[in-house]
Image (cartoon, grey):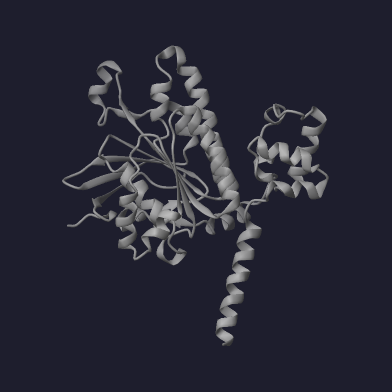
Amino acid sequence: MQAEEYEEQSEVAGAEELEESGPMPINSLEQVGISAADVKKLTEAGYFTVESVAYTPRKQLLTIKGFSDTKVDKVLNEAAKLVPMGFTTAADYHQKRSELLHITTGSTELDKLLGGHGIETGSITEIFGEFRTGKSQLCHTLAVTCQLDEASGGAMGKCLYIDTEGTFRPERLVEIAQRYNLDSEEVLDNVAYARAFNSDHQTALLNQASMLMTESRFSLLIVDSATALYRTDYSGRGELSARQMHLARFLRTLLRLADEFGIAVVITNQVVAQVDGGMATFVADPKKPIGGNIIAHASTTRLSLRKGRGETRVCKIYDSPCLPEAEAVFAITGSGIADAKD
């Protein structure tokens, strides 16, 4: 009996600790002198946490109707007092990073490539490659594994899935859930899905995602693919600057959500053939991810996928601040991503 009571108390304490360590709801500003009416305006403008306000440039807050220079300064000052935004020691940051959760990819070899644990939370991971290289299959597997407990390689959270190409298939989630002995109905209920129809809609969905994350615990946000709609909404060199600016704002919002909620952000990207004249002949792989430097700088870890033999695929670390350039072989199976059979 005592053991059961202790277990219940531990669960409650863990839930409270989780709540305290998460982002602060926007209505916390009311306790430091910001009026309820102004908090409501912030919410209507898409700001659901104190962190989202603190991380936003001053000029952007000035676009909110009824917000004067003085009011914006007051809101930012109060938000800065609640959100730590100054210097810290490398030791403290190292300790913070050691507490990051990781999400297993379903393949031991692929997890090893990613530092031994899988996809890192709190940052953006970009996966790019040609069609049929396993980008969407990896996304479907992660949508299930993120719901596993920490001991099983999960992050104990729900998944947000933004689909821009119509490739999301809930039947795949059911098959993958069976592999991990999870209740398929519960797994499907824990995935919030949205189909994006244009680049503006894709960005607007991030506001809805932010609102959902303040109401429930999410550990993963997937955008498959982040760049497909930009290729059709903007065409030619004349619109290149506008496209890159819009894409940069979208990626900045993704990074803010990763920082704000500590979730893993996984985006897929398409590739394009390099047309650099004769030089392309001497390049081992003449295909490069689209989006240019904008997407390269926004992504923390970039993974390149290519086809192998049969159902096997090869993943290469294309760019990472802490992982060495290396490769791993994995397979696409009926129950998601797994290790390749010898």
In the image, residue 293 above or below residue 133: above
Q: Quadrant of the C terminus?
A: bottom left
Position of 301 with respect to 3 (left or right) is left
Q: Quadrant of the N terminus?
A: bottom right
Q: Position of residue 238 (x, y in %)?
A: 45, 12
Q: Position of residue 85 (x, y in %)?
A: 69, 44
> Which residue sits at x=30%, y=23%?
274
> Which residue sits at x=39%, y=36%?
225
Q: How many marks?
A: 0
Q: Position of residue 98 (x, y in %)?
A: 53, 58
> Which residue sits at x=29%, y=19%?
275
- Can the viewer see residue 115? no
- Can the viewer see residue 166? yes
In the image, residue 209 above or below residue 116: above
Q: Position of residue 235 (x, y in %)?
A: 40, 17
Position of 147 with respect to 57 (left or right) is left
Pick the front one: 33 or 293: 33
Pick the front one: 278 or 131: 131
The extreme bottom residue here reads: 1
The extreme top residue here reads: 238
Pick the front one: 49 or 135: 49
Position of 297 with respect to 177 (left or right) is right
